[in-house]
Every structure is written in C-alpha cells, then in structure tokens.
Image (spheres, rainbow, N blue to C red):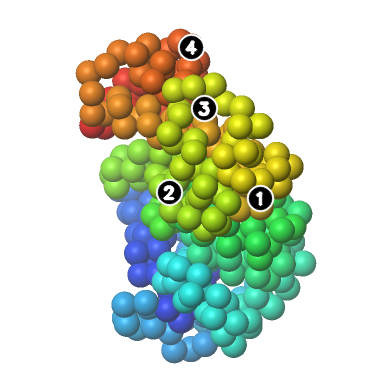
Amino acid sequence: MKLDVLALDGVFDSGLATVLDVFTTANELAAMLQLDVAPFDVTIVGTRKRVRTAQGFTVPVTHTLADTGAATDWLVVPALGCKMPETLEPALQRADVRDACAALRARAEDGGCIAAACIGTFVLAEAGVLAGHKATTTWWLATLFRQRYPAVLLDDSRMLVSSGPLVTAGAALSHVDMALWLVRQASPELAALVARYLIVDSRPSQSAYVISDHLSHADPLVERFERWARGRLAEGFSLDEAAQAAGTSKRTLARRMQQVLGKSPLSYVQDLRVERAVHLLKTSNKSLEQIAGMVGYADGVTLRTLLRQRLGRGVREVRLEA
C-alpha cells in the first residue's frame, strides 16, 4: 500500500508522528514475523517545501502534493495544531491550506481515497470533499463543523467513519485509530498485532470522552436547557417542561439542539444520564439497579443496554476503569 501523508505548516506533532509510527511498526512486525503483507510505502508530502510542526520541528517533506497522485492508494491528512475556533478559522484561510483544498478536490474527483483525522477533517470539509458523505470530527469542535459544513452528514459520536473512498477520525489521538484502520485493509492480523504492541484498545465511540458542559456552553439556550436537565435526571423527560424551563418553544429548542449539538433534546438528556451513570459506576459501590433509578431509568437492563450502545463497553468494563 502506497500512502501520502500531507504535512501542512503547523501540523499537529502527535498526529503526524502517530500515523508514521503505526506504519513503521506495521512494517517492522510484518518483516519480523514473516507475514505475507507487502510493506507500507509512506511518503510525506506538502503544499510547500518548507514545513514546520505546531511545536516548531522541521518536517522532511519529500514531494509537493501536486507531484503525487495516481500511484497513491491513500492520501492521509493529519490535524493542524489548532485546537479552538479562534485559531482554526484563520488557519483554514491560509494560502497553503487553500492550495491543499484544491489538490484534495482534484484527488477526490479522480476517485482517490482520502483519510483525515481530528482537525484534518476540517481541511477535507473545507475542500468540499465531504459534502453528502457521512463523517466524524473532533468532538469539541462539532458545533463549529456543523455550522461551517451543513452538507456533511456528521456523526461526532463515532471515533471512525468510513464513507466510500473517504475515512474520517475523531479527536486528537484518533490518528492511531485511522492508521490502524488503513493497516487493517491490508491485513487484519497485522493491524491487531500493531495495536497490541502499541497498547491500543478498541475505541469505536468518542462519547466516553465528550465533556457535555463544553459543548452546551456554545449556545445560551442550549446551556439553559442543559442546566435544567442536569437538575432532574432522575425524573422522566418532558419536552414541554424542557422548553418552558429554557424560555422557548418546543420547536425552537429542538431546532437549536440540532444545530448546535446535532441531536434531539431527549438524546442529549440520555447523554447526560450516561455521563452521570459512568461517574457513579466508577466512584460508588451502588448497584446497577440503584444507579439506574438515580439517572431516570426503571431498571438496570435499560441502562446496561444504553451504556453498551453509547460507549461500546459494558458495566464491568466501566467499573474496571475506575
């Protein structure tokens, strides 16, 4: 498999290094164990010949992005080192990023396969490549992503989303999940070995890492709803009461929740219930039935099912993480 890894100025150091380390480890293990897997041929490309990481290290760019193409199996886009909208939005307007977007559009139009992680998904969306496709992105910037790219079918609860020739991964160290996914396309056995050597657990969901307060504070109406919901998690949910407490109509509340968080008021309350349940499982000796009652569910079976759906883990696994 031939891969081009795009390094833009200010690339996220850990993201770039993680991608390179996964493929280097895969090549080393395949050779050591004499696995019948062709080597991963990785080339670092850029839109400029001189590139520095977010931490100021020089990146050895081998080719410019315009010089690569048909012979490449995958183009991989690591994150920029911009963690907040104030720095990200200006970065997306830089000349080198605009040039990268043009090259990404051309690559997609030619049927090329592209993978992006974390802030790299913004670069891909900025190029228009993700329009009409399912995708994920870094969880704390999901609100901004929805506002900028409404044509993308965003599911920010997932760690990894594959949609045709495109693969997107979630926040920060989801770079390793993306790289392992690419290794898995060549050899599931090798991908499993690399994960074991690097001590990487299966992480199908970002939900366990989301800080709900951070997301709700992006909008005053959503924040009012969030404060009201947290105060009555043990009670049944009523959209009428929720809208009244937030000082708005049911329709406006539902529309704003969809715009900001990409989910319904009820779905967000379920997120809060899962968050509270996980905290209680890790910090108390209460039974699952007791915890279920404290977060608004009639029995432990319902809560157990919801935890498995939202987190990809069961009760015992959550308790062991304490």
Q: Which residue is mark 2?
A: 213
Q: Secondary structure at mark 2?
A: helix
Q: Locate residue 31 relative to residue 255 in the image: left or right.
A: left
At label 2, the amino acid type is: Asp
In percent of width and height, residue 184 lies at 50, 44
Front one among 77 and 135? 135
The residue that label 1 is drawn on is 256
| Residue 29, percent from left and from top | 33, 48
Amino acid type of the residue tagged 1 in the rendering: Arg
Specify few, some or many for label 1: CA neighbours under 10 Å numbering under 14, 14-19, or 20 or more: some
- Relative placement, left or right, of 53 versus 252 is left
Distance (Cα) linking label 1 and label 4 = 29 Å
Front residue of 251 and 62: 251
Res. 308 visible in picture: no
Q: Amino acid at mark 3?
A: Gln
Q: Earlier in the sequence, mark 3 or mark 1?
A: 1
| 313 shown above or below 212 | above
The C terminus: image quadrant: top left
SS category of the residue bearing label 4? loop
Placement of 44 over or under 93, stated as above or below: above
Depth check, front residue: 261 or 197: 261
Tell me which residue sits at (32%, 82%) in the image. Answer: 56
Amino acid on which the number 4 mark rests in the picture: Ala
The mark that comes first in sequence, 3 or 2, is 2
- Residue drawn at x 44%, y 36% as measured from the top left: 230
Find disc 3 in the rendering and name its residue. Answer: 309
Q: CA distance from mark 2 to mark 1?
A: 16 Å
Q: CA distance from mark 3 to mark 2?
A: 21 Å
For the residues labelled 4 and 2, the Cα–Cα distance comes to: 26 Å
What element does badge 3 sit on? Answer: helix
| Helix, strand or loop for disc 1 | helix
